[in-house]
Structures are given as structure tokens and as C-alpha cells.
Amino acid sequence: MYKKALITGLTGQDGAYLAKLLLDKGYEVHGLVARRSTDTRWRLRELGVDSRIVYHDGDLADASSVQRAVLKACPDEVYNLGAQSFVGSSWDQPITTGIVDGLGVTHMLEAIRQFRPQTRFYQASTSEMFGLIQAERQDENTPFYPRSPYGVAKLYGHWITVNYRESFGLHASSGILFNHESPLRGIEFVTRKVTDAVARIKQGKQRELRLGNIDAQRDWGFAGDYVEAMWLMLQQDKPDDFVIATGVTTTVREMCRIAFSYVELDYQDHVVIDPEFFRPAEVEVLLGNPAKAERVLGWSPKTNLKTLIQSMVDADLKRVAKE
Ligand code: NAP
Ligand code: F7E
């Protein structure tokens, strides 16, 4: 018997990779997709999966649409990836971020509890919940200290997932994922902002790249590897929480060096520090410990940062050349 999955955030980076993974495994894939005035399905087309998905019009802020999607899709598994996911915007839209990234999780958990309690649930939690880090390497037992409205909203989403698991016995798991990137990453995130700029500068279409705090450190992995961990969590007998990371941390500065040097440029000739891109409160360093995921799920990252950034530069070089 094939399984049915419902993905929120289907049109985002992770949604597209996860849809492909599940379709390849023989799942019937449904997506909750919010109406927008512009096309949002380009990532699904890029991976060749857009016509193989059952779409449900809905928004995580609208509990009735979430309920309808669950009732119509009758999913075996729900992956809740929908979110206002850009940390920088969360200071400009703190209320929307709180409703979608926080309350939206409860809308989905309530729909499952009331109408389909056998459904397994995955919550897209984040290393941003660690924020001002309380341990050098963060794992499932590290205390949280979020530093942005995004981190705070996600922390609510995380704890309500734990609470519904403990209160109602739902098979609800939370993946605490560290930064993961790909050629399908949104252009506002720093890796993609850099690889897009490298491609433009190399082709004479841009001269400089304006960045904020390039001394910040992140534990960056490849999104394609990370969606596999999401799926593995829902295949376990017992729901649980897992840190998904590479265990290596790198500065934004070093990531720039990797990207520019790949096309024989020196980042120091092009990067300009601009106060506009500094945050009201910064997460200076993140470094995950994925030992539990390795032990219980048998998961480990397959892609290192250099290979990842070079693949993103390659994709951007091709795209920019066609513009
Ligand atoms: P993304 O590319 O920004 O995608 C976000 C998705 O959420 C998009 O499909 C977006 O739809 C959808 N969405 C936004 N508001 C919505 C609403 N009100 N109702 C329903 N859907 C809505 O994010 P991502 O990188 O794929 O990340 C996936 C999830 O993992 C997010 O929850 C994110 O917070 C979390 N996460 C990401 C990372 C990472 O490094 N990528 C790490 C940890 C956790 P539109 O296309 O219509 O805007
Ligand atoms: O910033 C610094 C910035 O926006 C990374 C989301 O997927 O991962 C992501 O959140 C670092 C920060 O990602 C610029 O200050 C410097 O220290 O690429 P980012 P993020 O904030 O880490 C987590 C795990 C999520 O859950 C989120 O959804 O880079 N930085 N200069 C800059 N960042 C940006 N965006 N732009 C700059 O110009």
C-alpha cells in the first residue's frame, strides 16, 4: 500500500526536495499552498515534480483551511515546513511570524488530533532556538535562548509539538535543523546572496556585494541530505526530537572566500560591509552535534560546505548567463 503525505511549505526549498524524495519512494504527495499573486511553483518545476502533486489551497494562519486539507488528503504523514523563515524579516513582521510559525503549528496539530490522530507529524524546528548559545556544541539537551521573533515563534512551535505528543500521544517529532542550503535556496539568505553575486560579478553584471556581519558562524549542510532526516524521523516506532547538523561551523567570511575563489576572484576586492544588513540581535555562532541522529536514525550528512557552495555557484553561473 502506498502512503500519503501532506507537506506545508511545499513551494519552499525544503518542500521541493522533500516532495521529490517522497514521490521517488512511491508516496502520494499533497501540498498546502497559500494563494499568491505570483508564481511560487518554480522549485517544483526545477525538480520536475510539479505535475505529480495534489494541491490544496490554504494558509497556516487559517485554521479552517488547514483542517480542510487534512480531511481531504487523509495523510499518513504531515510535514509542517510552512513558515515565514527569513530571520531578518521577523523583526519587520513579528506578528505574522508569530501567527504562522507559532500558532500555525497548533492549527495543524489540532486538525490531526481531532480528525486523524493516527497521522505522523514532523515539525520544522530550528537551530535559531539556541540563539545565544548555552553550550559550545548544541544537541537535544542544550537549553534554548532565541534571539529573534522568528526564533521565539519557532520555540513555541517546538514546545507545542512536544506537548501534543505528551498530552495526546500523537506521533509528533521535531527536527532541530541547522542551516541547510542548495541551488534552490531563497536569494535573501546569505549563501545564495553570495553565490548569486559571485556569478554576476564574474559575468560583469555586478561590481560589489554588500553584507552584514561576516564574522557570524554557521553549521551549513545540504538541503537534499536534510529532508532525508525528516522522513527517517517519521519512520521510527517512537516520536522524538533530533538535531540535524554537520558538526562543522564556518564563518560567513570563509564561505565568501570559498565562493569567490572558485571562480578565481578575491572576495576582499568585492565585499562591502553595510550596517543595513546587521541584525538587531545576532546569533554569532551555531555548531550542532548530530550524534543522536547518527545513532538512532542512521543519518549523517553526505555533502561538505565546499562542494555545496561550488554547486550553488555553478547553478547561478548558468542562470545568470541566460538573463
Ligand atoms: P522557505 O524556502 O522560506 O519556504 C517556506 C515555505 O513556507 C514556502 O513554501 C512558503 O510559501 C510557505 N509559507 C509561508 N507562509 C505561509 C503561510 N502563511 N501558510 C502556508 N505556507 C506558508 O523555507 P525552507 O528553507 O524551505 O525551510 C522549511 C522550513 O524549515 C521552515 O519552517 C523553516 O523555518 C525551517 N527551517 C529551515 C532551515 C534552513 O536552513 N533552510 C533550518 C531550520 C529550519 P510561498 O512560496 O507561498 O511563500
Ligand atoms: O544568515 C549573516 C547573518 O539569513 C546567516 C534560515 O533558514 O537558518 C536560516 O537563518 C548569517 C547570519 O540565515 C548577511 O547575520 C551577514 O548570522 O543566511 P541567513 P539564518 O539567519 O542563519 C536557520 C537555521 C533558520 O531556521 C532560518 O529559517 O549570515 N549575514 N551578512 C547575512 N545574512 C543575510 N541574510 N544577508 C546578509 O547580507
Image: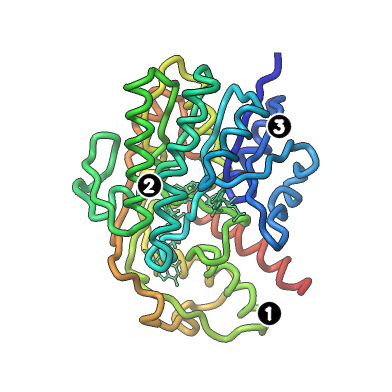
- Judged from the image, the secondary structure of the residue bearing numbered disc 1 is loop
Around disc 2, counting alpha carbons within 10 Å, would you say few (fewer than 14), some (14 to 19), or many (20 or more)?
many
Query: x%, y% of residue 180?
Result: 49, 50
Inspect the image, locate mark 3, and give the three-letter code of the amino acid beneath it: Leu
Per the image, the residue denoted by label 2 is 154
Ligand 1 within 8 angstroms of badge 3 C-beta = no
Q: Looking at the rendering, which quadrant does residue 250 occupy? A: bottom left
With respect to residue 134, does 163 lie above or below?
A: above
Let me know if residue 16 appears in the view: no
**Which kind of residue does numbered mark 1 sit on?**
Gln
- Give the residue type at disc 2: Lys
Q: Quadrant of residue 66?
A: top right
Can you identify the residue that label 3 sits on?
A: 23
Q: Foreground: 20 or 195? A: 20
Q: Position of residue 53 (x, y in %)?
A: 74, 37
Measured along the vertical axis of the image, is residue 77 above or below residue 186? above
Do labels 2 and 3 touch, CB within 8 Å? Answer: no
Residue pictured at 71% horizontal, 72% vertical: 320
Residue drawn 52% across and 38% down?
80
| Residue bearing the label numbered 1 | 203
Q: Is mark 2 within 8 Å of ligand 1?
A: yes
Report x, y in % for residue 287. 32, 49
Question: Is residue 158 rendered to the left or right of residue 32?
Answer: left
Q: Looking at the figure, which quarter contains the C terminus?
A: bottom right
**Residue 205: x %, y % from top left:** 66, 83
Q: Nearer the viewer, mark 3 or mark 1?
A: 3
**Distance from the alpha carbon under mark 2 to that under mark 3:** 28 Å
Image depth: mark 2 or mark 3 in front: 2
